[in-house]
Amino acid sequence: MSANPMPADRLSSVDEQVDRILESIQPLDPYDQPLLEALNLPVCERIVAPMDLPSFENSAMDGYAVYVDDVASASPDSPVHLPVVGEMAAGQTTMMALSPGTTVRIMTGAPVPEGADAIVPVEWTDAGVAQVRITRAPRPGEHVRRAGEDVRTGDLLLEDGTILGPRQLGLLASVGRSQVRSRPRPRVVVMSTGAELREPGTTLGHDSIYDANSYMLAAAARSTGAIAYRVGIVSDDPREFEDALGDQLVRADLVVTSGGVSKGAYDVVKEVLSEFGTVSFGEVAMQPGKPQGFGFVGDDATPILTLPGNPVSSYVSFEVFAVPAIRRMMGRLPYRRPTVRAMCSTPFSSAPARQQYVRARFTIDPMGAHVTPVGGHGSHLMGDLSEANALIVVPADTTAVQGGDQVDVLVLDRDF
Ligand code: AMP
Ligand code: MG
């Protein structure tokens, strides 16, 4: 597989780069998966009910199964007394028939004895065991769940493409399905590169920093619905990076790297992958996140996104490029997070000729949706990034936003 190369001579727009990625990444092949594995994935079949729900007539209450005619006159002033000739619990397999003039104690979900046409809830009785005193008459069919009243064999349960949430999975289990056809979660391998990186939990030298990106990006991949494999830190040695990448490809549907794609010396990702010729490195007219790479590596042509190392750039790049790629693999529409409109509360300026993603706090109150930029511009500002719950998207040709302007916002951490 090959991607249309990014132009080397001019910056791509964000949309061009996203389109390039979406065009060359294919949805993964669907297969039958255990129900829980398919949570939040689209179903890849049209599901028709193989059985009725309920599948047999059963009681909606704990109480007494009766012939309505036997208890029609029951009232607090003139209760009806019936002999209790048996008991039916949920899960009981032996079917009973009820003789007129008698009753059977019955629990919720138990099959209604043959002949009985209503259930008297225990609350309308003295809860008698050998004989019961009934003070209120049920209507015919009252508190009886009829077979097929919920779902009939042959009913359409789920249209192809429906997202399998908790209720849909519950429905499938109700009709006896243990598996459902859906695309698998993409396995996303996340690698951080940088000789200066150290694993959190270890001691830091004065010249080193903790590896934040592999945790942040692996978490973002998981939040998007992928299976994330966080690889330990890879240094800036080309051989080491190439070996580590080669080792990971067997378990990757997508590789995401951070760092090593700028113009400096020791930019290991760019150095190694440029040689393969299947990954193109270009610049995207965005801020943060200008240096971007995308292509395919290894025998299986595994897609790879190489994100810049600055944490904020890395995060924004993941949101803008990796999230649609992962969703496309799962067949989950829409691929791109939709923007919402909000009123910007404070003015700010924006770099010319770059689509800017401004960290912000988004709120909704009775007056509408509001957004306020948080923190500075620096791509290293993790404290500000964690305070933000949204990104204001400022188009490339906009250089200033006034307080009160309506802006487009990506609201993060939200299902879509
Ligand atoms: P690079 O893209 O490799 O040139 O890195 C740009 C900046 O981001 C440098 O200051 C790096 O130290 C920093 N950086 C790179 N990778 C990470 C990471 N995994 N976690 C935190 N900071 C990083
Ligand atoms: Mg680096």
Image (spheres, rainbow, N blue to C red):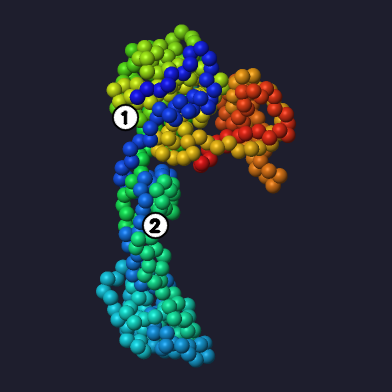
How many C-alpha atoms fall within 10 Å of the one at disc 2: few (<14), some, or many (≥20)? few
Q: Which of 179 and 247 is in front in this view?
A: 179
Query: Where 81 sits versus 341, above or below?
Result: below
Q: Nearer the viewer, residue 348 or 299?
A: 299
Compare marks 1 and 2 and give the one earlier in the sequence. Answer: 2
Q: Mark 1 points at which residue?
A: 251
Query: Where 406 sits versus 96, above or below?
Result: above
Query: From the image, which quarter does the N terminus lie in?
Result: top left
How many C-alpha atoms fall within 10 Å of the one at disc 1: few (<14), some, or many (≥20)? some
Q: Name the residue under label 2.
A: 156
Query: Where 335 sits versus 36, above or below?
Result: above
Q: Is residue 354 left or right of residue 65?
A: right
| Residue occupying the point 41% across, 88% down | 70
Residue 121, given in percent of the width and then of the height, sits at 45, 77
Q: Which of 126 and 92 is in front in this view?
A: 92
Quarter occupied by residue 238: top left
Q: In this view, does 403 lie to the left or right of 211?
A: right
Residue 277, given in percent of the width and then of the height, sits at 37, 15
Q: Which amino acid lies under the numbered mark 1 shown in the image of this protein?
A: Arg
Label 1 to label 2: alpha-carbon separation: 37 Å
Task: Find numbered disc 1 in the image and state the secondary structure of the residue it sits on.
Answer: helix
- Residue 245 visible in the picture: yes
Task: Find numbered disc 2 in the image and state the secondary structure of the residue it sits on.
Answer: strand
Residue 58, given in percent of the width and then of the height, sits at 37, 72
Residue 254, given in percent of the width and then of the height, sits at 38, 28
Quarter occupied by residue 221: top left
